[in-house]
Image (cartoon, grey):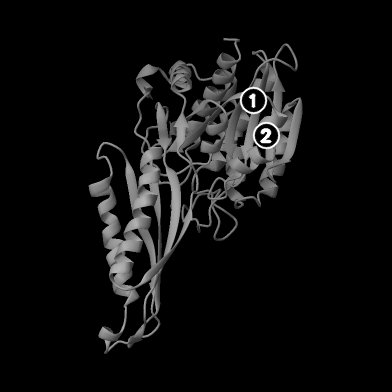
Amino acid sequence: MPVNNHIAECEAEIAGWRQDLHRRPELLYDVVETARFVTDKLQEFGCDEVLTGIGRTGVVGLIHGRGGAGGRMIGLRADMDALPIHEETGAEWASQRPGLMHACGHDGHMAMLLGAARSLAETRAFEGTVAVIFQPAEEGGAGGKAMIDDGLFERLPIEKVYGMHNLPGMPVGRFGMRHGGIMASTDEFKITVRGQGGHAALPNRTADPIVIASSIVLGLQSIVARNADPLKSLVVSVTEFNAGFAHNIIPDTAVFSGTVRALDAGHRDLAERRIREMAAGIASAYGASVEIDWDRNYPITVNDPDESDFCSQVAAEIVGADNVDPSAPPLMAGEDFSYMLEARPGAYVFIGNGDSSGLHTPTYDFADSAIAFGASYWVRLAERALGRA
């Protein structure tokens, strides 16, 4: 398998960067040390320009090809933030910050892109410019959107943009991608049921919001089963329910919240409409009312078909066609790289992380053995996309 020789030789060093980043996790936009680490490395590698503070703490390194500045520009993106989880791996490089850890592999994503950046800056075997994008606040903070809103694509003439995420359960040395939706939209809702409280011994004199809210929760389960196209993916999950304060008092209100995940824009709209209709209708039937707060969060991550095919070809050059799944199943998790793919054509791919624990768990760790594959993929993608094979 033609992994980049220079990257393979430096794999242990790149893994060391990853482990250093793992020891010092930071959340959302507060990735100050992480961004400084990335900035220092990019400057050390000889990037032609390093831009900082895009989207508050985002970093972008520009690497010009042999022809110098000008020509086409592509973007390669990695995320930088960690999660509020207490690590339980017991690894030598475990988090030194209690309650924080890189439980989604963003440390590995940064290391792979840094390894690729150093190789690209040394060889410059392409025409045009590669922008290596290090983004804050992927974990719920919409850092990708913040970078766009801060002028990322106005300041830089990026034509196409590419992303990558590790996938536990997929063997190391394998890649997966697909046409169209590869990650789901992530809408969130909170529903407040306003009834009439009273003595628990006299429920006939109340409009019990707990019963009403429970009826709504059960009703919402029929949306996927009876309203959605069974051939299209949709998830409606209630994840929090709060009501009451004493065993002998029926409260006035009950509040519950949850999430909607969709891989189809029409079903995303369908779910919101039916949740609003069902909640209002059930509450009215019981003589109560509802207030609905809806957060239309990350959009669907949609791969351009041509770019997905291109990424499949590039990955095959690294690991062989037998180790590339061009029709990998999508995930119902969300990803704010979706905002970048709304703004520019490109593709998002999965790279195998082996038999590690699942993402967002306290025992998860990125597989350092995947680094050479991921960094080599980035280098080859840049060289192919910018016309110097």
Q: Position of residue 268 (x, y in %)?
A: 39, 44
Amino acid at circle 1: Ile
Q: Position of residue 26 (x, y in %)?
A: 61, 52
10 Å crowding of disc 2: few (<14), some (14-19), many (20+): many
**Toward which corner of the image does residue 231 lie, by quadrant?**
top left
Residue 173 or 65: which is nearer the viewer? 65
Q: In terms of secondary structure, where does tag 1 sit?
A: strand
Q: Name the image quarter holding the N terminus.
A: top left
Residue at (26%, 89%) from the top-left corner?
A: 201
Amino acid at circle 2: Leu
Residue at (23%, 48%) from the top-left corner?
A: 226
Report the residue marked by disc 1. Answer: 158
Residue 357 or 234: which is nearer the viewer? 234
- Mark toward the start of the polypeptide (2 vs 1): 2
Numbered tag placed on residue 152 in the rendering: 2
83 shown above or below 37? below
Badge 2 vs badge 1, beta-carbon distance below 8 Å: yes
210 shown above or below 376? below
Left or right, residue 184 beside residue 57: left
Q: In terms of secondary structure, where does tag 2 sit?
A: helix
